[in-house]
Image: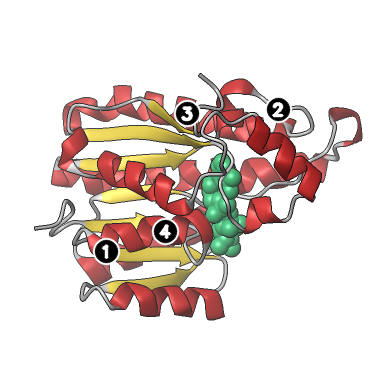
């Protein structure tokens, strides 16, 4: 018996990194998994192969999460392919860092579109389906910087704070229809996004973490599984920081 037996999960930007780890954990717990990414490249195909090994239904879809019409079309396709959608993880995200005085309008717009508008797009497309099912769990992948802010990441931090408020608002608006919406705020997680940082910047981050290590994508996937499953059936509108105690 898995925690997610019989459920269908949709995860955005899951070809690699945290999204992939979430997809793998969900499949290990019995879920059928649909995931999106910008393109279905070798990474995405590898992820499909690893997911298929769990013996449940798996399909990858090329879709730009920042595009409203594309998102509605892909959600319709997934509903047709899988029959229902019980879990949505808004995971796709990018960074385009810079100090405010040097930040361009393009940097701001791109990060808000991919990180925040994408979640609006998917929630807008999926909530009618979840309301008809009278249940669903939505998880927004925020960040500790969405709670605390971060110099040189005003665009990213604002997008991640927006995801938290979006989940709380959906939780309030749709609780009576059986929908729950929560956010995860990962700290410093070892993925391509953080491996790109210079060694001294990485070390500075690790020194601020009481557990003295970067998190793993699996640390995030475990919490996502809790929020996706009926184990958290009385939890909505919350932000769970998964950051090794970096921000208490
Ligand atoms: P990653 O860069 O390894 O993976 C992100 C995935 O999203 C990639 O597969 C990428 O192709 C996809 N993607 C990007 N733009 C997209 C779009 N427009 N439409 C569809 N897919 C798109 O990143 P990582 O580290 O796995 O991060 C996943 C999420 O977790 C992001 O939202 C990130 O902001 C968040 N996060 C990550 C932290 C970390 O330390 N790695 C810390 C806090 C939050």
Give the color scheme: rainbow, by chain, secondary structure or one colour: secondary structure
Residue at mark 4: 21
Q: Are marks 4 and 1 in contact (CB under 8 Å)?
A: no
Q: What element carries label 2?
A: loop
Residue 152 vs 66, above or below: the answer is above
Q: In this rendering, does residue 69 appear at all?
A: no
Q: Nearer the viewer, mark 3 or mark 4?
A: 4
Alpha-carbon neighbours of circle 2 within 10 Å: few (<14), some, or many (≥20)?
some
C-alpha span from label 1 to label 2: 34 Å
Residue at mark 1: 27
Q: What element carries label 3?
A: helix
If you read the primary sequence from the N terminus, does the residue marked by circle 1 or circle 2 appear first? 1
Q: Nearer the viewer, mark 3 or mark 2?
A: 2
If you read the primary sequence from the N terminus, does the residue marked by circle 3 or circle 1 appear first? 1
Q: Position of residue 146 (x, y in %)?
A: 58, 28
Q: Are marks 3 and 2 in contact (CB under 8 Å)?
A: no
Residue at mark 3: 164
If you read the primary sequence from the N terminus, does the residue marked by circle 2 or circle 4 appear first? 4
Location of residue 148 (image quadrant)? top right
């Amino acid at each position: 018996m898995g925690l997610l037996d019989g459920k269908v999960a949709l995860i955005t930007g899951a070809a690699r990194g945290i999204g992939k780890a979430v997809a793998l954990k969900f499949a290990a717990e019995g879920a059928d998994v649909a995931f999106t990414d910008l393109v279905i490249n070798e990474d995405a195909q590898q992820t499909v192969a690893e997911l298929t090994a769990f013996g449940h239904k798996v399909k990858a879809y090329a879709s730009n999460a920042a595009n409203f019409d594309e998102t509605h079309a892909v959600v319709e396709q997934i509903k047709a392919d899988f029959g229902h959608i019980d879990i949505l993880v808004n995971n796709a995200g990018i960074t385009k860092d810079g100090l405010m005085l040097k930040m361009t309008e393009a940097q701001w717009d791109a990060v808000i579109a991919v990180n925040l508008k994408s979640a609006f797009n998917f929630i807008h497309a999926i909530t009618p389906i979840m309301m008809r099912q009278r249940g669903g769990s939505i998880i927004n992948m925020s960040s500790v910087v969405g709670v605390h802010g971060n110099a040189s990441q005003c665009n990213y931090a604002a997008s991640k704070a927006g995801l938290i408020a979006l989940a709380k608002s959906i939780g309030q608006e749709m609780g009576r229809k059986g929908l729950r919406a929560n956010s995860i705020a990962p700290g410093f997680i070892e993925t391509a996004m953080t491996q790109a940082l210079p060694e001294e910047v990485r070390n500075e981050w690790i020194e601020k973490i009481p557990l003295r290590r970067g998190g793993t994508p699996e640390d995030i996937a475990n919490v996502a599984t809790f929020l996706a499953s009926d184990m958290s059936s009385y939890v909505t509108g919350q932000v769970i920081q998964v950051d090794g105690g970096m921000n208490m």
